[in-house]
């Protein structure tokens, strides 16, 4: 028995490590190899170099894809936070009609395979003869990230005491004053967190973008195009950068989305 | 027509959710300047009454009249009432000062006036130095007072208090009861206070409206509901009481006899036309409080019951004695007797003559 007592934790630790290596090991490969050059199909391990990163900064197609990505991300964030806040407020209002159906509609594009969402959008844009452009990518990304933004804001909204809104009305405030002076300040950190998460999602969204884009490429789409020509160190560098960026965003988002009590001291006596 | 001295009238107000009726045809007058308490167990509909008056929910039927005119269409933010919520509902992102001044700020009151009135209100609730704190940095009792200051600052016609002391510990609660009552006296504003705590209601209210299962059981002064219960429910709701079932006998002036298992008891029916009107032979209950029971020989207008002592519980100033009536039945009667400093006590099994004055004995319909 005593052997088993000692063996079990060791086994669990080994298993956990193995899972972690399996999950995150592959991510390390492009990061590490982005610092070495490749010649004639073999990696030159002798000398680490940042040349791949330098090459990226001079690659106009990558830079313009980055620019497109930022615009799309910003557009999708603004649209989804505005829509998500409005929908969450509607869902939480006592007289909301058809709220469950509405919620189902919001979640659908997020839960369906992206290729289905993308195709549906593509078919829709063609049917209404809406020319594919930067705007169609922004719309596609908004539809995709809306569920996450909506859910994040709704969760915060529902954690607020319902009597806060009642108290505001009771003290003579209009609905606009109640939104601006009571709801918005209490939702703002959730909205910021949701915006960052939405941006991170939009930043590496590929499938929907491929389908609804016109002539523009976002960074992941550019990456996709580059890979078809074979793996080069600058692809590794780009992957490493995207990885770094999205990880950083997620870490920041977590800070904003922590319950208020965990950040600004306990709310209890 | 507005009636002098009546601030608010509820007329046949009912509320139901689907097939579930929460309130059945409530009639209630709130007098100007009074401290009225709506008292009832949970689920009795007391908070629903408060929410209907505040405008947070709409009645299913009936009218709520302010100065004689129906306020059904008046939105929450136009009603001249302010509420102290059960969870206080202080805005967590605003300081105490901003919380208290909120009602003035949203009305566009000049800043200088807000500052002055906030300072006055905080002074009134004895929170002067805490204005810059946030609600999360205050104790329960302090938050309670911020909520009160925020409600009184707009000088409402009526302040609605929804079980505001429920979250406080016993000692603080006692203190806040006195405090609330003194504030109410000082600002002379009508308070409508909802609670499930009988002692709290008796300690503060000018009038108590006792509710049960969506109906008003009785409205009266604390003394009235305590000593002259109108219904069996009220008689049982305020602590220990003696309820002896029987059948009604004849009416004699302001008294009426009831034949019970412990003999014929004569009870006062002063101010109880409904009991007086019941036909003889109707079932009813004789009700008298343990502290109204004495020992000794019955004089004119007193009821005498021979009883055997079952249990004696010394409780300081008074001693609670449980007795079983010596008669056909084993009806338990409780007597709260003054304790004797010399220590001579009543012993178990002893038979004593209990005396209940007719004036302290009331009748309620069974």
Image (spheres, rainbow, N blue to C red):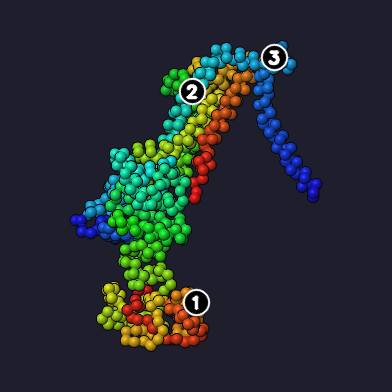
Separation of residues labelled 3 and 1 (CA atoms):
96 Å
Residue located at (44% from left, 28% from top):
A79
Q: Eyeballing the image, is B307 above or below B63?
A: below
Q: Residue furthest left?
A: B1
Nearest the viewer among B306 and B274 is B306
Residue located at (37% from left, 40% from top):
A178
Q: Secondary structure at mark 3?
A: strand
Label 2 marks a residue whose chain is A
Residue located at (38% from left, 71% from top):
B235
Which residue matches tag 3? A38
Residue located at (77% from left, 47% from top):
A5
Q: Quadrant of residue A60?
A: top right
Separation of residues labelled 2 and 3 (CA atoms):
33 Å
Residue B202 in percent (x, y) is at: 37, 65
Q: Secondary structure at mark 1?
A: strand
Q: Eyeballing the image, is B168 above or below A110?
A: below
Label 3 marks a residue whose chain is A
State whether discs 2 and 1 lie on one chain.
no
Residue A220 in percent (x, y) is at: 57, 21
Nearest the viewer among B176 and A63 is B176
Q: Are marks 3 and 1 in contact (CB under 8 Å)?
A: no
Separation of residues labelled 2 and 1 (CA atoms):
80 Å
Q: Secondary structure at mark 2?
A: helix
Q: Eyeballing the image, is B160 above or below B345?
A: above
Mark number displayed over residue A72: 2
Mark number displayed over residue B313: 1
Q: Residues within 10 Å of mark 3 (few under 14, many from 20)?
A: some
Q: Residues within 10 Å of mark 1 (few under 14, many from 20)?
A: few
């Amino acid at each position: 028995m005593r052997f088993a007592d000692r063996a079990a934790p060791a086994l669990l630790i080994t298993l956990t490590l193995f899972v972690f290596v399996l999950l995150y090991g592959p991510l390390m490969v492009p990061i590490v190899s982005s610092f070495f050059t490749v010649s004639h199909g073999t990696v030159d391990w002798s000398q680490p170099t940042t040349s791949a990163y330098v090459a990226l900064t001079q690659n106009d197609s990558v830079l313009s894809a980055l620019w497109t990505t930022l615009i799309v991300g910003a557009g999708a964030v603004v649209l989804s936070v505005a829509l998500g806040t409005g929908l969450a407020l509607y869902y939480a209002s006592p007289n909301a009609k058809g709220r469950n159906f509405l919620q189902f509609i919001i979640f659908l594009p997020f839960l369906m395979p992206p290729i289905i969402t993308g195709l549906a959008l593509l078919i829709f844009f063609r049917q209404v003869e809406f020319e594919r452009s930067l705007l169609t990518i922004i719309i596609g990304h908004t539809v995709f990230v809306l569920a996450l933004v909506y859910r994040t804001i709704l969760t915060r909204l529902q954690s607020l005491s319902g009597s806060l809104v009642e108290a505001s009305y009771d003290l003579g405030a209009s609905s606009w004053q109640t939104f601006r002076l009571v709801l918005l300040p209490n939702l703002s950190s959730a909205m910021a967190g949701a915006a960052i998460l939405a941006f991170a999602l939009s930043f590496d969204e590929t499938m929907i973008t491929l389908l609804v884009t016109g002539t523009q490429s976002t960074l992941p789409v550019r990456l996709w195009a580059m890979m078809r020509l074979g793996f080069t160190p600058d692809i590794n560098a780009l992957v490493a950068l995207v990885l770094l960026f999205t990880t950083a965003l997620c870490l920041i988002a977590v800070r904003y989305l922590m319950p208020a009590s965990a950040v600004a001291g306990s709310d209890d006596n | 027509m507005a009636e002098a001295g009546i601030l608010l009238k509820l007329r046949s107000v009912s509320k139901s959710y689907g097939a579930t009726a929460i309130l059945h045809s409530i009639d209630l007058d709130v007098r100007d300047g009074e401290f009225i308490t709506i008292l009832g167990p949970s689920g009795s509909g007391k908070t629903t009454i408060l929410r209907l008056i505040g405008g947070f929910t709409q009645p299913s039927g009936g009218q709520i009249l302010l100065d004689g005119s129906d306020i059904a269409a008046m939105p929450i933010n136009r009603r001249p009432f302010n509420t102290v919520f059960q969870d206080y509902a202080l805005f967590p992102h605003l300081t105490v000062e901003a919380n208290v001044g909120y009602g003035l700020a949203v009305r566009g009151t000049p800043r200088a006036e807000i500052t002055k009135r906030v300072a006055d209100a905080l002074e009134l609730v004895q929170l002067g130095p805490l204005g810059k704190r946030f609600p999360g940095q205050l104790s329960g009792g302090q938050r309670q007072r911020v909520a009160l200051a925020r409600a009184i600052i707009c000088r409402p016609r009526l302040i609605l208090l929804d079980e505001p002391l429920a979250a406080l510990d016993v000692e603080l609660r006692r203190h806040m009861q006195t405090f609330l009552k003194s504030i109410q006296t000082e600002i002379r504003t009508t308070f409508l206070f909802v609670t499930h705590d009988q002692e709290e209601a008796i300690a503060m209210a000018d009038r108590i409206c006792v509710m049960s299962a969506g109906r008003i059981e009785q409205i009266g002064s604390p003394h009235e509901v305590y000593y002259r219960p109108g219904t069996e429910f009220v008689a049982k709701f305020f602590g220990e009481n003696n309820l002896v079932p029987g059948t009604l006998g004849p009416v004699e002036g302001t008294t009426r006899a009831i034949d019970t298992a412990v003999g014929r008891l004569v009870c006062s029916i002063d101010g109880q036309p409904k009991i007086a009107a019941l036909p003889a032979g109707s079932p009813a209950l004789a009700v008298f409080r343990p502290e109204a029971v004495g020992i000794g020989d019955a004089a004119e207008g007193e009821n005498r019951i021979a009883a055997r002592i079952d249990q004696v519980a010394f409780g300081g100033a008074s001693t609670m004695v449980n007795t079983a009536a010596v008669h056909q039945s084993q009806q338990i009667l409780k007597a709260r007797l003054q304790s004797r400093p010399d220590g001579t006590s009543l012993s178990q099994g002893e038979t004593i003559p209990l005396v209940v004055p007719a004036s302290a004995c009331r009748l309620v319909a069974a």
